[in-house]
Amino acid sequence: MQINNIISLYVQQFAGSLFESTGSKLAVAALIIISSIILAFGVDLVFKKVLLHYTAKTRIKIDDLVLEAVKRPIYYTLIFFGIFLALSVVGIGEYFFIATNNLLLTLLALVWLFALVNINKILFDNVFPGLVQKTETKMDDELLPLLKGLSDIIIVLVGLGMIIEGVWGINVGPLFASAGIVGIAIAFAAKDAISQFFGGLSIYYDKPFKNGDRIEIGDGQIGLVQEVGIRSTRILDFYNNMIIIPNSIIANNKIINYTSPQPQMMVKITIGVEYGSDVSKVKEVLLKIGNDIDLVLDDPSPSVRFDNHGDFSLDFALILWVKYPSEKFSVINEVNTMIDIEFKKAGIGIPFPTYTLLKPE
């Protein structure tokens, strides 16, 4: 027997013994119902004239909405409680009393369940949007409607489960087990969408990049992050093409973020000169080129490295730093143009591959 049934029978027996000698059970029951209605109207009046009048003066709107959401459930709770006591006084049959009591509790639970869904809607419509607008990513804005729907479903399922098992004594375990099997089947059918969704969540919480960052995905795609969505991420490449990449691919690949933790970037330009060239002179010319370009940072300063004796050339590397990754290709263009001009002035030759063929006699 459920605990609410035990309480109901106890109240019924106590009330029946108390009013058995008076012969006025119906009059007392009617008085209890009328009193509960008057009390409910009184509490409703307090909400309208006092509490809501006070909350209307505050700067926030949510307190008015929450009070409006709980005002009606409290009103019905008082009336239902009066009906419950009245039935206990009347002393109806045990089976009918338990069934009526369960029905009243079910109706009252549904009223409060509806109130919780309404409060959840108030939070998602008036509180959470202001919080997600403060973030840089748009993913949480997209997740908000989804989370609202999921939370509504959870509230309803948990509430119905408590009503079915707590009031009517029906074991909901098999029902949830059946729902779990159906959920597994749905998960297999939509595994790609689910993997992309959880990939989006991992990007949102791990934050490997943000809008405006220049990134490179494992397959070599480079571009500016435009938007991180629930299912995919959009990046704008150098050709002004929008590339849409599923989040599951991003979550399972190496990501190079050229903008974080700081945007400045090293640019390495390799150049080969003819054998016999003056190494010191080559370094001097390359350093002058690096220092003369406006987009190149002074700190760290440009540097030249003699890397290798190649097959056809002496290989040098000019190391430069730029403030933003977007300036890399402009700097490379200017450096290569200046190398062609300055090397001609300095008499430094740039070799091309040559082969010596030995013909046997």
Image: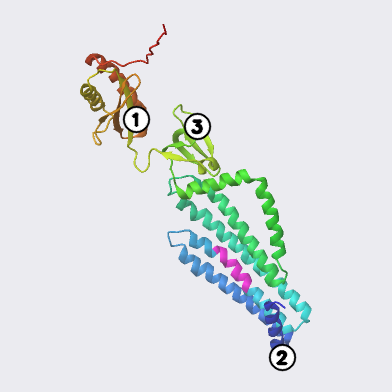
244 relative position to 11: left or right: left
Q: Which of pointers 3 and 2 indicates the residue nearer the eye?
A: 3
Above/below status of 290 relative to 139? above
The residue tagged 1 is 327
Q: Nearer the viewer, residue 320 or 329?
A: 320
Residue shown at 63%/79% (left/top)?
35
The kind of secondary structure element at disc 2 is helix
For marks 1 and 3, the one nearer the N-term is 3
Q: CA distance from mark 1 to mark 2?
A: 92 Å
User: Start and end of the magenta stretch?
Assistant: 68-77
For marks 1 and 2, the one nearer the N-term is 2
Crowding at dot 3, Cα within 10 Å, few <14 / some 14-19 / many 20+, comes out as some
Image quarter (top left, top right, bottom left or bottom right) of the C terminus = top left
Q: What type is the residue that disc 1 sits on? A: Glu
Q: Which of pointers 1 and 2 indicates the residue nearer the eye?
A: 1
Above/below status of 227 relative to 92? above
The residue tagged 3 is 242
Q: Which mark is residue 17?
A: 2
The kind of secondary structure element at disc 3 is strand
Q: What type is the residue that disc 3 sits on? A: Met
Q: CA distance from mark 3 to mark 2?
A: 81 Å
| Circles 1 and 2: CB atoms closer than 8 Å | no
